[in-house]
Amino acid sequence: MSASNKNTSDICAVVLAGGSGTRLWPLSRGEFPKQLLKLSGENSLLQDTVLRLDGLGGAKRSPSLLVVCHEEQRFLIRDQLEEIDRAPGRILLEPESRNTAPALCSAAHILKRDGGDPIMIVLPADHAILDAEGFRAALEAAVEIAKTGFIVTLGVVPTRPDTGYGYIRRDSSTNVRVGKSARGHRIAAFVEKPNQQAAESYLASGRYLWNSGVFILRASLWLEAIDRCRPEMLDACREAVENGRDDDQFFRLGREAYARCPADSIDYAVMERLSQSYLRPADDGREGDPIPAAVVPLSAGWSDIGTWSALLELRREGDHGNSAQGDVLALDTEGSLLISSHRLVTAYGLKDTVVVETPDAVLVMDKSQTQGVRAIVDELNRRQRDETRTHRLVHRPWGSFESLQSGEGFQVKRLTVKPRAKLSLQLHHRRAEHWVVVKGVAKVTRGEDVFELNPNESTFIPVATKHRLENPGRSLLEVIEVQVGDYLGEDDIERFEDDYKRVEQPN
């Protein structure tokens, strides 16, 4: 009997949080991608993804949780989940992004390695859903179908002929039903993003659903499907897990093996191939039955917020169809998205326009052209501009730093250190630093000296001197740092001790 037919009710939410989010630049950056942004309320998209699972199957809290992300975002992901009291059982770290299929394959290997074979609810971390209750109802139906050996996905009931989404064609003549309430359809085909004429015909037919990227299936069944469709991916991910290592609540995948893994999406690696009648091998080695796949319709106000225009559609307000966030004044303006994160933004006479302001960049574009953000980011990367990678406010596991001013040979930053947190014991080869405490109490290590600084007190760290900044108190520590030297890059650092294990180690 296939492992996928085991009778177990275990459920694990596998949250895929490795996206780069370039389509929402300049709010989204390489080191602070879309899933970490608060775009639709007081929580980030990642936090909402986890919280909307509360109540699934009558449970008060979310099911067990495994998050897959890039190693650079590990502390941000951990901190955001701790903010909502939903710390994951494990955070699986990708040494480099290889798309969703390898991420899920590695997660399934980890779950099987740990002795389980749960139903995995596979969720992108960067989607918005307005009707959480309706979403949970669709998930519960999908889980019941997945228990019978299906790969299940949620298909969004389309509200317009959109050319920005992939589609799922359901086999309306073949229903899948488990019990009284779990209903779905066999999948006839996955369809790539259509042109306008095709999208209109899809909508008119009633047979097509938007591809949500949400999948529900047993861990062993996913590994079985990958073995059939992309065996080289299965082998590479298995080796990456075998050569990986635990690091507290993190698990670091083996770097070399993971780099060899093909970079494919779940759809391309498996789902499109299943609809082309890839077969499951029978126990005696002969061809057996196709691996069954089903889709459950979802109508719950879903959006992948893949463009600024999609965010506008999600957040339209008032008679003029605008959406404003931050310090914004808009007059005689309609159908526009206006976001301010740092200063007053004013608009007059705009129509169907996107304006997004951050401390170091401003985006202005026609609402119908928001797919062009990718071209902007590509050009900025070609020019080696840091604005695609970081904000002026940069998060670190001990707190954050913000660049306030810079010029030739100097840079001014504001450091914010969390209670009981400390920076690494480090030195810089090409710069000196001046520290002035403006809030809280700082514990300073400078060479052989250890001392405290109170507000309005300062110290000087010479070039090539070991030093450390700590916050021994229970409130935030704020320090103004003035760097002086011929090179001020963040890579001019040599660490000796670090609470967050950032001292260079072999993977």
Image: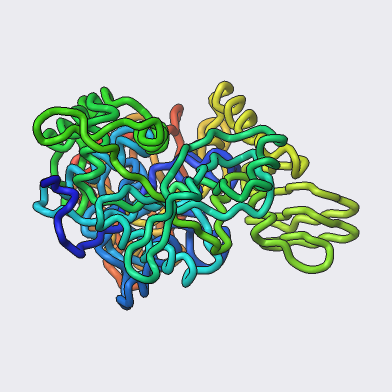
Q: Give coordinates of residue 194: x percent, y percent.
A: 62, 34
Task: State whether residue 17 is above or below residue 472.
Answer: above
Seen from the viewer's position, the closer of residues 174 and 456 is 174
Task: State whether residue 372 is above or below residue 402.
Answer: above
Relative horizontal placement of residue 4, taking residue 216 as reference (left or right) = left
For the image, the number of numbered tags is 0
Q: Give coordinates of residue 41: x percent, y percent.
A: 56, 66
Relative horizontal placement of residue 459, taking residue 227 as reference (left or right) = right
Tell me if I can see residue 391 in this picture: no
Relative horizontal placement of residue 438, taking residue 354 as reference (left or right) = left
Task: State whether residue 437 is above or below residue 231.
Answer: below
Determine the residue located farthest toward the front in the rendered image. 173
Tell me the residue at 11%/36% (across/down): 283
The picture quadrant where one finds residue 159 is bottom right
Tell me if I can see residue 93 in this picture: yes
Q: Quadrant of the C terminus?
A: top left
Seen from the viewer's position, the closer of residues 444 and 140 is 140
Seen from the viewer's position, the closer of residues 299 and 367 is 299
Tell me the residue at 11%/51% (across/down): 114
Q: Give coordinates of residue 477: x percent, y percent.
A: 39, 64
Q: Give coordinates of residue 305: x percent, y percent.
A: 58, 50
The picture quadrant where one finds residue 291 is top left
How is the model colour-coded? rainbow
Task: State whether residue 476 is above or below residue 484.
Answer: below
The picture quadrant where one finds residue 493 is top left
